[in-house]
Amino acid sequence: MAAYASWIYDAVENFKLAIHAWVFMTKHAHLLVTPGSDNAISNGMHFLGRYYVCYFNYQHSRTGLVADPADYLCSSYRANAFDQKMEMWSPHDEDLGDELITDIRHALNTGFNSVQS
């Protein structure tokens, strides 16, 4: 996990990315990123992909969920929920609003095709 976080930090520095949120799952990761240039995300993901796939799949062969998102230490949850400062976290400039957040949660829990418009 520390290696992947280090590679993300290197991608942030090398490709001018702003990381707003992340969660490292057992076999994949989710990132909320704002690019600093047109090709920043593509180049950054390519950079991460060269290191990530083989290493991560080899090292982690288990799955599971935590009871409380704050218990999952490999996540930006504490930064976003509790404003805990983390080195590679950048707060997002835009507040999504309660209605959109509710729609996103509904979509994640029931399937993306069921979002009300």
Image: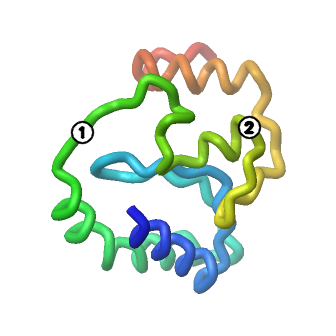
Q: Is residue 21 left or right of residue 72?
A: right
Q: Which residue is depicted at the point 81% across and 38% down?
A: 95
Indicate the amino acid at tag 1. Thr
Which of the two residues, 31 or 36, is positioned nearer the viewer here? 31
- Residue at which label 2 appears: 82
Which of the two residues, 45 or 66, is positioned nearer the viewer here? 66
Q: Position of residue 13 (x, y in %)?
A: 63, 82
Q: Earlier in the sequence, mark 2 or mark 1?
A: 1
Which of the two residues, 69 or 47, is positioned nearer the viewer here? 69
Indicate the amino acid at tag 2. Phe
Circle count: 2
Q: Is residue 62 left or right of residue 102?
A: left
Q: Position of residue 1 (x, y in %)?
A: 38, 62
Quadrant including the C terminus: top right
For label 1, the crowd category at 10 Å Cα-Cα, with few meaning under 14, some 14 to 19 and many 20 or more, is few
For residue 66, above or below residue 26: above
Q: Is residue 95 left or right of residue 88?
A: right
Dot label at residue 63: 1
Q: Which residue is depicted at the point 16% across and 64% down?
A: 58
User: Mark 1 and mark 2 in contact (Cβ < 8 Å)?
Assistant: no
- Determine whether the residue tagged by mark 1 lies in a helix, strand or loop: loop
Which of the two residues, 103 or 72, is positioned nearer the viewer here? 72
Q: Position of residue 79 (x, y in %)?
A: 69, 46
For label 2, the crowd category at 10 Å Cα-Cα, with few meaning under 14, some 14 to 19 and many 20 or more, is few
Residue that lies at the very extreme toward the bottom in this rendered image: 14
Q: Is residue 90 left or right of residue 47?
A: right
Q: Position of residue 22 (x, y in %)?
A: 55, 51
Residue 43 visible: yes
